[in-house]
Amino acid sequence: MAVYFFYGDEEYNIEQEIFRLKKGLDKNFLEMSFKTFDNPKFPDLVAILRTQPMMFGKMLVIIKCNDYFTKTFDDKEMKQIEEALEDNNDNLDIVFVAELPRNEGKKLDSRKKLFKTLTKYNAKEFASIPTYKTADLEAWIRKQAKGKDLELDSDAMTAMISQVGNNLREIDGELDKLKLFVHPNKKITKQMVNEFCISNEDLFAFSDYLMKGEKDKALLEYRKLLEKQYCLGIVAALQTMLRRWIILKAKASECSAFELAKLTGQHEYVVKLTLQKLKNTNLKDLVKLKQNLTKAEFKIKSGQSLVPEKEIEDVIIG
């Protein structure tokens, strides 16, 4: 038995770590050996911790536990939790997961008894990598590329960070796309990144036309983006950008550029440049656009939309 505690605002790295653990399970019994629970109530939590795996071998249980850090277990409850963790079955691995909002600088309350208990085990914080920490981002990209049997020189990695930013899920998706393009070769160049990866400038041009109400030009830019990526990838990248813009517009009057850079995970220079571009943009319009995109994204992912690309077009021209 092993107990893990994964927390932080880089949910993609948490997801990858869970995937690594999941690979150790018997594929023939995944439905029974892999379970996820969302903030179960105390009695259910203790019962889950005392689960007895059956004949199919090892079992992996994921417990999403964000809500536990906004409440307090009393001493009696904590004692039961601690005993359940200590006496757990040898074939049961338990992963407590607390995913925090990305780029908002939030932390778990380390004073909580539960936090102190969980950090006695295999605890690891997964923090997002700020864009200005280029060496750390390049190291992550290099590792991911190696796992995909790809090679990127320093110029290609610099272009990747410049165009995609610090969203690791998006970077990984772009690497997959580039792998298909260069196959059977391995080498990725700066030119390939510039040509096939969506850049912040591409997204800025698209959203800029949306903000100005120039729907025909926005639609044209969107169709150009579709040549590089599937619509949900575009929406994901745009959602990340809009979230940062909303933070910048909402906090600009009360925070310095340095503080805003920490909040958004961007370089201070990028923050200043973005604020200048957003000077005539209304915060309410940004929020409304993000809400409309979220609704369209839900319809696509839930299968309610027969033509996903058209769903996003309706947001643009609506």
Image (cartoon, rainbow, N blue to C red):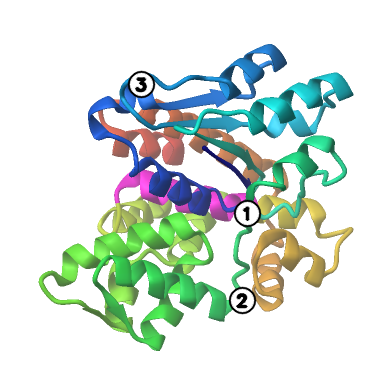
Q: Confirm whether the magenta stretch covers residue 236.
A: yes
Mark 2: which amino acid?
Answer: Lys
> How many C-alpha atoms fall within 10 Å of the one at disc 1: few (<14), some, or many (≥20)?
few
Mark 1: which amino acid?
Answer: Lys
- Is the stretch drawn in magenta largely helix, strand or loop? helix
Q: Which residue is mark 2?
A: 133
Location of residue 132 by image quarter: bottom right
Is tag 3's residue or tag 1's residue first in the polypeptide sequence? 3
- Position of 103 compared to 301: left or right? right
Is tag 3's residue or tag 2's residue first in the polypeptide sequence? 3
In this view, the residue farthest toward the top is 43
Mark 3: which amino acid?
Answer: Met
Q: Which residue is mark 1?
A: 124
Q: Confirm whether the magenta stretch covers residue 306.
A: no
Location of residue 150 by image quarter: bottom left
Location of residue 221 by image quarter: bottom left
- Position of 132 compared to 209: left or right? right
Q: Position of residue 101 (x, y in %)?
A: 66, 45
Q: Which portion, as a residue range, is magenta? A: 230-243
Q: Position of residue 266 (x, y in %)?
A: 65, 68
Is 10 rendered above or below residue 155? Answer: above
Q: Foreground residue, 192 or 47?
A: 47
Q: Secondary structure at mark 2?
A: loop
Q: Residue at x 85, y 19 (%)?
A: 76
- Position of 213 compared to 222: left or right? right
- Position of 29 compared to 277: left or right? left
> How many C-alpha atoms fall within 10 Å of the one at disc 2: few (<14), some, or many (≥20)?
few
Residue 8 seen from this side: no
Q: Foreground residue, 317 or 115?
A: 115
Q: Which residue is mark 3?
A: 32
